[in-house]
Image (cartoon, rainbow, N blue to C red):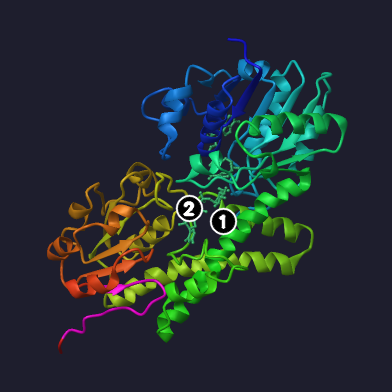
Amino acid sequence: MEFKRKILCIGAGYVGGITMAVIADKCPEYKVTLVDIDHEKIDRWNSDRLPIFEPGLDEIVKRRRGKNLFFVKDMERAIKEADIIFVSVNTPTKEFGIGAGMAADLQFWEKTAREIKEYAESDKIIVEKSTLPVRTASAMERILSSGNKGIHFEIISNPEFLSEGSAVKDLEEPDRVLIGYKDTPSGKKARDEIIEIYAHWVPREKIIASNIWSSELSKLVANAFLAQRVSSINSITPLCEITGADISEVSYAVGTDSRIGSKFLNPSVGFGGSCFKKDILNLVYICRYYGLNEVADYWEGVVKINEYQRERFVRRMLDAMFHTLANKKICLFGFAFKANTDDTRESSAIYVAKRLIEERAHLSITDPKALENAKKDLKGIDVNVKYIEDPYEAAKGCDAIAVMTEWDIYRELDYERIYRDMRKPAFIFDGRNILDHKRLFEIGFNVYPIGKPELIHHEPY
Ligand code: NAD
Ligand code: UGA
């Protein structure tokens, strides 16, 4: 079959993999190819066991793979063939040198720019899909146009707003698609080509075109705003625990104001995920770079509250369990950074697990999808850690359960059975407020929700 256009995506991770699968599904006349330096990952994309778990993804990949969706290892050939190249490589926080712990590490990004320059033999549209610091497009352009081979590269910014766990739906029904372009004839032509792809299924009024720097910055700011809402509600939880106010009632009362809205006001043990922290720190770094220290301090507060919330969770466990966790058995319900994903990057569960290990507790970790990643996260420090798929088995003989991830299955367990099999006094720390606390208390548990007074059975003296 003769394809209308050939799209390549460099980076077949969470964003590249899912986004391209949906584009291939919606645009059968486009050839969509993914390439990745991680060849094992490419093998898994070509197998029945995909490298990531995301609801709805398996079906789409099965439907399109080999027809107009391809996963390949040959970077040179893939670049030569492509008309449009999406770059969706990771842009983690820099761990060395100037900006360590704050700035974005752009080495993977720059490497792809240099590879595109080396192999390209015809004009191409380069689409920034990764989340990048504002003005990265100009660096990309300088690299691509250096030592001019007479090839024109037009850079477009098209940040991704999908959330893991609901990524397929987010892509199929996005709130908006953002396309940043340069206001030149070739910039406008490239913008229209990218609009044409999304217009296959996204209503035209939801496709926003903007200046390229606004597009890059909007992505960082959107994540900062979302994380800021979580930190805002989490910052009120200790006050609720002390005063007898209930964070669910406060959250509801505040969120019903239509100017505020109810989403992203669920209190938790702290937000995780590969992006919130890194993108905010990147924003903070850029602000400091430009001397905007007050602005930087404001946004840094969002990350600080998140760290405070995680540590507060561990300290509450320690205080509740008679100031020692040494040799106690603690079961973590969930390890993924949120429900419906196997992703554990920056999960609060990693932080909590490490702190509990420091306190010499013994852990048993259960999660329906994330145990493989949990093992990698705790590698080298997990002598006293067990990974058990069945939550009943995992909780057996434990002193406490700590809910880390809001998986639906944890709402539906037989907690009487679990209580019977635990050591007494038995504790539950609900880091997601998903359980029926009153019922658990009646069963016999000492219950510690987030942002609500604890329910404790006082033992007779
Ligand atoms: P990821 O780590 O899952 O995937 C990135 C992939 O790029 C990896 O498979 C890696 O092997 C590959 N890669 C790195 N360098 C390469 C190179 N030179 N050539 C070919 N492949 C290379 O990361 P991700 O979660 O998909 O995130 C990618 C980008 O998208 C990041 O900038 C992130 O901030 C952004 N983003 C992520 C999400 C999300 O929910 N995960 C959502 C929106 C935006
Ligand atoms: C987030 C954004 O929601 C996406 O729009 C963005 O594209 C993506 O980051 C990214 O750039 O990577 P994601 O991290 O996949 O998506 O998941 P979220 O649903 O935003 O949750 C992030 C964290 O916040 C999770 O740990 C979640 O449990 C926590 N959270 C979320 C809360 O604690 N409370 C809430 O009310 C909402």
Q: Disc 2 residue type? A: Glu
The image quadrant of residue 123 is top right
Where does residue 84 sit, x and y in percent of width and height? Answer: 68, 25
Q: Which residues are magenta?
A: 446-459
Dot 2 falls on a residue whose secondary structure is: loop
Using the rendered image of the protein, determine whether residue 102 is visible from the camera's viewpoint. no
Going 67% across and 68% down the picture, which residue do you hit?
297
Where does residue 363 sit, x and y in percent of width and height? Answer: 27, 57
Which residue is situated farthest in the bottom direction here? 461
Where does residue 30 sit, x and y in percent of width and height? Answer: 61, 21
Please tell me how crowded label 2 is: few (under 14), some (14-19), or many (20+) other residues with Cα within 10 Å. Answer: some
Up/down of 84 relative to 393, above or below: above
Q: Are marks 1 and 2 in contact (CB under 8 Å)?
A: yes
Where does residue 249 sit, x and y in percent of width and height? Answer: 44, 75
Going 40% across and 55% down the picture, which residue do you hit?
350
Which is nearer the eye, 385 or 163? 163
Q: Which residue is mark 2?
A: 346
